[in-house]
Image (tube, rainbow, N blue to C red):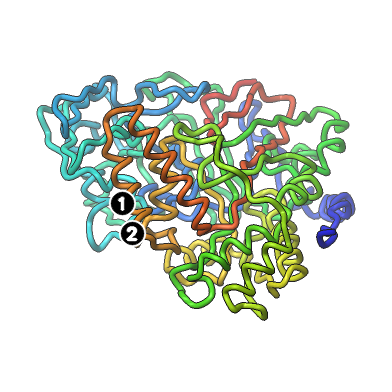
Amino acid sequence: MPTPIRSVTMLAAVVAATLAAHLAALPAAGAAGERDITVAQGIDAEFLDVQMTNNIVTLIINTSIYDTLLTRDKQLQLVPNLAVAYKLVSEKVWEVKLRQGVKFHNGEPFDAGAVKFSFERINRPDFKSPQKGWFGPIDHVEIVDAFTVRFHTKVPDPAMPARMTLMYQLAPKYVAQVGDVQANLKPVGTGPFRFVEWQKNERIVVEANDAHWSGKPAVRRATWRPIPELGARIAALQTGQADLIVNVPPDQLQTLTATKNVRVEKIPSCRIIYFGIAQIKGGPLGDRRVRQAINYAVDVQGIIDSVLLGNGKRINSSMPPNVWGYDPSIPLYEYNPTRAKELLAAAGQTSLALTLQAPNGRWAMDKDIAQAVAGQLTENGIKTNVKIIGEWGSYVRSVLDHKTEDIFMNGWCLPSLEPDHWVTPNLHTGEPVSQYSNPEVDKLMEQARAEMNTDKRKQLYGQLLRLIHDDAPWLFGYQQMDIYGVSNRLKWTPRGDESIRLPEISF
């Protein structure tokens, strides 16, 4: 039997204990106006300079302030945003027509120059944007006229339309005038909401930009609050201090459903949760047999059932089922402690000791899941200690600096829904998030990202995902079920890309 998983039923007591404190600390949601809202997430934004982050919670907040060239609608289909049309004009050139009459929040006009500036800023050597890898195939941007640009790519790039959903646009004159530091503290975009204030680890406030090309948002003012503790987030929703909360723990679904004026919304997410194995450190983790043993030693389905109460679906490689290119024929690793111990013995690692790092409050039940994983690894021949890193900025920095512990819990989702954006950032040699290097994997990634024939491209992703499965750079986890608590004063349904779009909220 696997190690018993720590119960989270004490959460109700935590809710009660935090309730009084939050009544004093937070104003009631909507107190300043009937159409003001408060959204509570697990962490604060890393940056309000949108090009300095690849963290989805930060991007969710920034998407209210900035626009991208393309976006996805509620059905996750590509639709125009700041770009109104695009076409392939030659094998390595995409032409994009831009929306006219758009202004940044400071009055500066949006045009082709802004697109060129925004792309080149990401690639500036001293800027160190973690988004650089998203746009690796692009060589340069050509200005055709004031509202037409051409993206010249190094290789044919079938993913260019999806990449444009990540191309956030910045105001060139503003950034040049105030500098990068100030642009982060007082962001200026073209988005449906304007920045008002940021009190670090307390709140970010935005207000409706009624001049936005899409029209006036129903929400007048929105406050994003970081509330790491689950009990505190639930208390905020139950007392009306928050209107929308994320990462509701499954064992609190019944409680919230019974709460007056509150409902629960659920949707399968594009997010995957995995445990990266720092193969680039070498030593025991450089041996495929050890990495495979880690996968056989953990009852992932048991953890999904026990901790998440079934709210998750196992993944067989490095992509979720709702991203194009997923291959359902790849088998899952079975829970097989005997096989794990055989592999460890064959690798000469019968007394292996590892450290697993995890955050607290970033993903639903993250700390509890990490402790369950470590417990099962320990029980099955791999002594594993857990290191909880509570401050999210520090956690991210350990990953980006390639200074993680032996195993690190991570989650991944991008609104592009482009398969290259699941495999390359996480597993290509030298990428900021990747703690892995395999020339064969790199070669297949590069082939797949440049293949314009849809059928051949899908075949390449099938090969790639099977190779990733077999080489086991991760302990493969699960596709997340996004669970939200929502005040009944809001008319809103969740999206499958995790994004919380303020213009999609009404009353």
Please state the horizontal and vertical placement of residue 212, each as a whole percent of the image.
Answer: 38, 25
Compared to 159, does 45 lie above or below?
A: below
Characterize the local packing of mark 2: few (<14), some (14-19) or many (20 or more) Cα atoms within 10 angstroms. few
Characterize the local packing of mark 1: few (<14), some (14-19) or many (20 or more) Cα atoms within 10 angstroms. few
Decide which of 260, 76 is in the foreground and name it: 76
Which mark, by number, is residue 258? none
| Quadrant of the image occupied by residue 346 | bottom right
Please state the horizontal and vertical placement of residue 489, each as a whole percent of the image.
Answer: 71, 24
* Image-based side of 13 in relation to 387, left or right: right
* Image quadrant containing the C terminus: top right
What residue appears at the point 79 percent right and 45 percent down from the top-left corner? 305
Decide which of 374, 340 is in the foreground and name it: 340
> Is any atom of residue 305 visible in this view?
yes
| Real-space CA distance between mark 1 and mark 2, rounded to the nearest whole angstrom | 6 Å
Disc 1 residue type (three-letter): Lys
* Image-based side of 180 in relation to 230, left or right: left
What residue appears at the point 29 percent right and 34 percent down from the top-left corner? 160
What residue appears at the point 45 percent right and 31 percent down from the top-left corner? 324
Compared to 159, does 16 lie above or below?
A: below
Compared to 399, does 68 lie above or below?
A: above
| Secondary structure under the numbered disc 1 in the rendered image | helix
Please state the horizontal and vertical placement of residue 501, each as a whole percent of the image.
Answer: 52, 31
Pointer 2 residue: 439
* Image-based side of 259 in relation to 277, left or right: right
Residue furthest out toward the left: 144
Decide which of 223, 40 is in the foreground and name it: 40
Please state the horizontal and vertical placement of residue 83, each as a whole percent of the image.
Answer: 29, 25
Pointer 1 residue: 443
Disc 2 residue type (three-letter): Pro
What residue appears at the point 48 percent right and 71 percent down from the top-left corner? 286
| Secondary structure under the numbered disc 2 in the rendered image | helix
Do labels 1 and 2 touch, CB within 8 Å?
yes
